[in-house]
């Protein structure tokens, strides 16, 4: 069967029709199986051919659908930048920065800007939809004081409501409530519902918004006295590109995507969204968002099932506990807002680093963040902690325009090496934060040992020393240290050989090793055996350099 060479959309329509036809033919064939004229084999063969055809067409459909989504996403991206530049240019002229403009010019430009803003909104919606359909809409979760957010946002709509002669009222029963949500995406949902209420309510009407705490979630309500929605239209209200029958004169053109996006966002948060309406009387939209405790319980369940799954496939799971110890020299105290803000900043850093789709990052309580890394061993998690520490150093934590110094502590526990359930892992990671870290120093040069041992002990580390490879392996076996500082040139067994043996032993492979060298040529050898060169240092570089490397691991 030939498909006509037209646009992806009309091809999709054509293929869908063809598929329907094929399905009907298959059904007809099945029904006529009593027909004695045609042999069973012949019929089976025929059905098989039709099924193959159907499968082929389905694959083509999927390909075209993806093509369409990619096309929408790339065109929308391509439109975004020039549109932003044009909007910026218009705003500059409207602000009379290049020179004065008259009233007539101003009105023309204002209309142009309004239309471009509408276009920008539609493009944003199309991008969101293509992400939702590709299953790529990610939430950037953090603590948000929803009362403040809700109140401020609704108040910002008062001027538009007044200009339309619509009474906008708000009812909230609490002062402060923190939910664990994606702030920007929830704002978009609230904006969509308010915009719609204002669009479809006539002059003199009213809009009432409310927020109610319930046992496991919070209920948000938006009630208007607008045009309402016909009963037969309700089932497709949240479908894509739905713009239902409207009364003349009320409502502006939109994309018909707002409610589809809102539904996806709310459901991704674990909430629900629905509507009730009476044609000609008005509409109520409702959505729920789970309380923090509900989200926490879901996270705990996920944690448990990740461990169960890992046990089943025999893979490790790393658990990192980040604890906000203090702000520089100041204790974190009770200033909720700064703590929440710092934790949210930290979460965004972590989301960029622990970016595997299976990784989970969660603010567990005011001062702790839990990071779960499936299929990640101890060594890789230690490297990841090093990257987190680097990222924190580079990132400024700013609150109300003032820089704040943060002091995060790190604890690590690996399943099943350190513990075999959630509570056990948390306990080990907590102990890991507070206990003294144990370093094993290996060098045949007594002076080096004495110097580094003294300095490291002063820094609060527990230090044991070995004078050759043999002794090092013995001490590791007695009690594995948190880190080994290993000289490369030693008599009998050299540093590379010791490293190789530690690597081959599953019980010691995770222990981070810092190599000490006196020659550049050793660096090349280090690379050859797959050693991370950032953990190889020249003895001449001194103690501060060593301490820097040690701290990136411990
Ligand atoms: P848009 O508003 O961009 O058309 P939405 O997905 O937000 O797209 O809404 C889809 C349709 O649902 C609207 O076009 C309108 O027909 C109907 N609708 C939404 N909210 C209301 C409301 N408050 N009152 C009446 N109709 C509404």
Image (tube, rainbow, N blue to C red):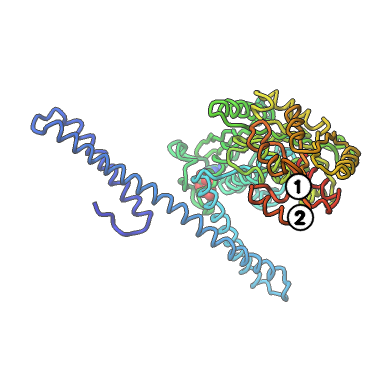
Could you tell whether 235 is left or right of 308 in the image? left
The crowd level at tag 1 (other Cα within 10 Å; few <14, some 14-19, many 20+) is: some
Residue placed under numbered mark 1 in the picture: 489
Query: Contact, CB < 8 Å: mark 2 with mark 1?
Result: yes
Residue 214 x, y percent position in the rendering:
67, 26
Q: Is residue 151 visible?
A: no
> What number of labels is visible?
2
Along the line of sight, which residue is nearer the eye, 103 or 17? 17
Residue 188 x, y percent position in the rendering:
62, 46
Single out the residue that lies furthest toward the left: 37
Q: Residue at left 72%, top 43%?
A: 494
Residue 291 x, y percent position in the rendering:
67, 30
Residue 250 x, y percent position in the rendering:
53, 50
Q: CA distance from mark 2 to mark 1?
A: 10 Å
The crowd level at tag 2 (other Cα within 10 Å; few <14, some 14-19, many 20+) is: few
Image position of 42 with respect to 191: above or below? above
Image position of 43 with respect to 138: above or below? above
Q: Is residue 417 visible?
A: yes
Query: In the rendered view of the protein, which quadrant contains the C terminus?
Result: top right
- Residue behind label 2 places its C-beta within 8 angstroms of ligand 1: no
Q: Residue at left 33%, top 59%?
A: 6
Image position of 215 with respect to 37: above or below? above
Residue placed under numbered mark 2 in the picture: 519
């Amino acid at each position: 069967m030939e498909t006509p060479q037209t646009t992806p959309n009309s091809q999709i329509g054509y293929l869908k029709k063809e598929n329907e036809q094929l399905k009907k033919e298959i059904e007809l064939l099945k029904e006529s199986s009593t027909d004695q004229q045609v042999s069973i084999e012949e019929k089976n063969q025929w059905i098989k051919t039709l099924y193959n055809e159907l499968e082929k067409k389905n694959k083509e459909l999927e390909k075209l659908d993806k093509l369409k989504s990619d096309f929408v996403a790339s065109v929308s991206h391509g439109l975004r930048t020039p549109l932003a530049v044009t909007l910026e240019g218009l705003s500059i002229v409207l602000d009379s920065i290049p020179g004065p403009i008259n009233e007539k010019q101003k009105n023309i430009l204002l209309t142009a800007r309004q239309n471009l803003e509408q276009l920008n909104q539609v493009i944003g919606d199309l991008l969101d939809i293509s992400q939702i359909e590709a299953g790529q809409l990610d939430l950037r979760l953090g603590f948000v004081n929803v009362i403040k957010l809700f109140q401020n946002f609704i108040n910002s709509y008062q001027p538009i409501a007044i200009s339309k002669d619509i009474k906008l009222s708000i009812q909230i029963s609490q002062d402060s409530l923190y939910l664990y949500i994606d702030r920007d995406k929830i704002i978009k949902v609230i904006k969509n519902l308010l915009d719609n209420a204002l669009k479809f309510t006539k002059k003199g009407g009213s809009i009432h918004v409310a927020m109610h705490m319930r046992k496991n979630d919070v209920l948000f309500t938006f009630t208007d006295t607008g045009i309402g929605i016909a009963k037969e239209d309700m089932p497709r209200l949240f479908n894509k590109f739905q713009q239902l029958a409207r009364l003349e004169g009320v409502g502006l053109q939109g994309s018909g995507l707002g409610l589809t996006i809102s539904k996806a966002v709310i459901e991704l948060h674990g909430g629900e969204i629905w509507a009730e309406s009476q044609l000609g009387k008005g509409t109520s939209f409702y959505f729920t968002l789970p309380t923090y405790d509900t989200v926490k319980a879901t996270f705990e369940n996920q944690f448990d099932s990740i461990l169960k799954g890992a046990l089943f496939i025999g893979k490790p799971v790393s658990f990192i506990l980040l604890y906000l110890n203090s702000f520089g020299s100041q204790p974190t105290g009770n200033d909720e807002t700064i703590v929440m803000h710092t934790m949210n900043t930290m979460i965004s850093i972590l989301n960029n680093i622990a970016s595997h789709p299976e990784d989970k990052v969660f603010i567990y309580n005011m001062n702790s963040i839990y990071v779960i890394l499936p299929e990640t061993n101890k060594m890789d998690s230690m490297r990841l902690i090093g990257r987190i520490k680097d990222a924190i150093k580079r990132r400024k934590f700013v609150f109300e325009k003032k820089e704040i110094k943060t002091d995060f502590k790190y604890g690590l526990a690996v399943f099943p090496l350190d513990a075999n359930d959630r509570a056990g892992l948390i306990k080990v990671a907590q102990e890991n934060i507070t206990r003294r870290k144990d370093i094993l120093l290996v060098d045949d040069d007594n002076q080096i040992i004495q110097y580094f041992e003294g300095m490291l002990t002063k820094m609060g580390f527990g230090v044991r020393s070995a004078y050759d490879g043999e002794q090092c392996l013995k001490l590791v076996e007695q009690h594995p240290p948190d880190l080994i500082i290993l000289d490369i040139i030693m008599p009998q067994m050299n540093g590379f050989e010791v490293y190789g043996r530690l690597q081959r032993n599953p019980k010691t492979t995770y222990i981070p090793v810092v190599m000490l060298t006196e020659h550049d040529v050793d660096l090349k050898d280090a690379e050859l055996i797959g050693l991370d060169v950032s953990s190889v240092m020249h003895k001449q570089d001194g103690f501060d350099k060593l301490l820097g490397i040690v701290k990136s691991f411990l």
